[in-house]
Image (tube, rainbow, N blue to C red):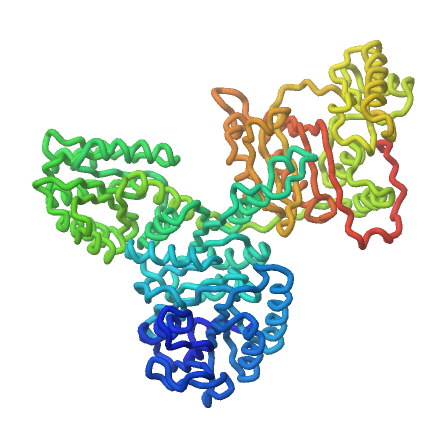
Amino acid sequence: MNSLKYIFEPESVAVVGASPTPGTVGNAILSNLLSSGFQGTVYPVNPRHTRILSIKTYESVGAIPDAVDLAVVCVPREAAEPIVQQCADKGIKGIVLITAGFKEIGAAGKAMEERLITICKTHDIALIGPNVLGVINTHGGVRLNANFALQMPNAGNVALISQSGAIGVAALDYAHQHNLGISKFISIGNKALTDESDVIEYLVDDAETELITIYAEDISNPARFLKAAQRASAAAKPIVIIKTGRSARGAIATQSHTGALSSSDVAYDALFTKCGVIRVDTLSHLFETAKGFTGLARPKGDRIVVVSNGGGMGVIATDAIEKNGLRMTTFEQRTLDALEKALPPTANIHNPVDIIGDADEHRLDRALTAIAKDKNMDALLVSILPTGETDMDAIANCICAFARANPSLPVFANLLSLDPEPSFVRILEKARIPNFDFPETDVRILATLIRYAECLRKPKQACERMEVDKKRVSAYLDSANRTGRTHLTEPECYALLQCYGLKAVDYRVEKTLDKIVEAARELGYPVVIKIISPDILHKIDAGGVKINLKNEAELRKSFEDISASVTRHRPDAQIDGFLIQQFFSQKGLEVIVGTNTIKDFGPLLMFGLGGTFVELFKDVAFRLAPLNRQDAVDMIMETKGSKILTGYRGQPACDMNALVDCLLKLSQLVSDFPEITGFDLNPITVLAEGKGIVLMDAKAILSIPPLLVDKPLQAQVNLQRE
């Protein structure tokens, strides 16, 4: 696809459908282009007029005598296709198609849109739209405002990508009200040819853009988005996104715990985590985050100092710091000594520092000077309320001077005023010091900034590849495909896992009662007995499981009970035998590890506390495959259960290394074989540190690709354990 420089950096623009009538789209776009101070040439195109807004107008694109970089097309839908073809014939390399009424209205519109795509692909044209608001580039050398709803925003370093034109209007209006400068704005609409990933790729290389904000209803290609967002992260250009649709769970695979807990929205969260994208829920959060990230410094840790002239504000800030998982700095003794000399006896010299309500800028300066060299401080929040003794502009200038003298320290402000438009706001904005109305907002944004900085500091890891037996796994999957099955039996699951270095608790597979009794003697009581049937995925629901059988009599009775229950619940089920397993009673922690394939995203891995309560408590974490070792560690540590795994209140720590290896091996398995669309290992018993893990149960769900239907069977699969 052609470069987006023809969209954002054109030297000439044709407005096709330009109009002299105020209130029309064609008039608004032309007016905005002219009033924005566009540095190139503008060509109105309308066959019914010779001049519009005092500019010579052309009857067609082909009639323009000069080369044209960008065409902004705002004609009726029926005229769009011939106009796009005229642009192609003219050699125009960028088109912004404002017109609506394409795939968003149904099949006929989609067919028209496909024809537009074909024209643009054939002629290497960068197409934005259809169904868009337009584009903006505030850079002084371009000054492009090619949209029909907004005046030129203030220039700045924040780019905004919006899938919705209406949200784009609201977002830019909010940015203007809060004095947030914009570098680029683009409404991508139907994303017929250019999507958010293409725009991110352009913005990563854009010198004027330091932060990228996005409103998205979907991500066209998650794999491409991942690569583009990782490039942005490598360039230290944060991406902050609102992705709507959290409440719409989409299609849920209810055949497994993992499927029941995962959804496309969970997959989006995992995608954003994988590439370091910051997800927020509201427009106010979007721009508050953007405002906080425009500060000049990145925090090196999570220890915060609060300085206030009101004890209540300091307490609120402290509560917010603890709630957001940050830490209050404990001052060094020399800092306490300096604060004691600098402040009156009534002041509080411990963090949060209270410089008392009658403080002026000089007292604030003395307090800041006293804490400036404290080695335990990673960020500073100054919260000042207006009083009769307080010159808020002087306070703001004091904070700015401190920030300049300490350029590596993030400084946030919470300055309040009874004036609806206080002048100190401009002072702080000019110095790029974030200022919010409430201290808890400062802390929330500061916490986001700290976590982003931690993400950037983490070393980039490659995915480990382990020696495995892929050939044998293929044989099992081919066997299932031959019989048209969509899930594997438990012994088959264990066999697949063993090919990838994951071993289940010792078991046997038998068909007759005498053989079952003999197997139990070999394994040693107590034992577990389970039905094996390709028609029964959830064995408990059919009464197909009995546990902790202590002797032969209990085993024989359980065999009869299971046979009767399965016959009653599933009389048509094919019975392949029974699995006899050691009843594992060694002390450990039960966890669940699973995967579920989400359309367009691929395998989504889940980790959480296991057993029957996983869906009730939902203490789970998700990541997209393939995982690297840090991903696996982060998944585990993200859950509340991680405190138990690492040793809680003197309890011995569990074998974290073995658990991490399990996640990596399962990740490799489902990445190597995408036809495995779901895999639940529940429960896994994690033993004490150095003792490993034990698989207690497994389920696998399949979706065999059509290309495997005629694939020759590679091996006869023996379900008996070798």
Residue, x 44% and y 86% (percent of image)? 58
Q: Position of residue 390 (x, y in %)?
A: 11, 43
Vertical position of residue 69 compared to residue 696: above or below: below
Left or right placement of residue 707 versus residue 436 in this view: right
The number of callouts visible is 0
Q: Can residue 237 be spotted in the picture?
A: no
Q: Can residue 685 be spotted in the picture?
A: yes
In this view of the protein, which residue sits in the foreground, 7 or 198?
A: 7
Q: Position of residue 327 (x, y in %)?
A: 34, 35
Left or right placement of residue 527 versus residue 99 in this view: right
Q: Position of residue 558 (x, y in %)?
A: 81, 15
Left or right placement of residue 493 versus residue 446 in this view: right
Q: Quadrant of the C terminus?
A: top right
In this view of the protein, which residue sits in the foreground, 230 or 53?
A: 53
Q: Quadrant of the N terminus?
A: bottom right
Q: Quadrant of residue 686?
A: top right
In the image, farthest residue toward the left: 389
Left or right placement of residue 286 versus residue 521 in this view: left
Residue, x 62% and y 46% (percent of image)? 625
Q: Quadrant of residue 606?
A: top right
Q: Quadrant of residue 415?
A: top left
In the image, farthest residue toward the bottom: 65
Vertical position of residue 27 compared to residue 447: above or below: below
In this view of the protein, which residue sits in the foreground, 162 or 140?
A: 162
In this view of the protein, which residue sits in the foreground, 487 or 643?
A: 487
Q: Position of residue 221 (x, y in %)?
A: 59, 57
Residue, x 74% and y 23% (percent of image)? 540
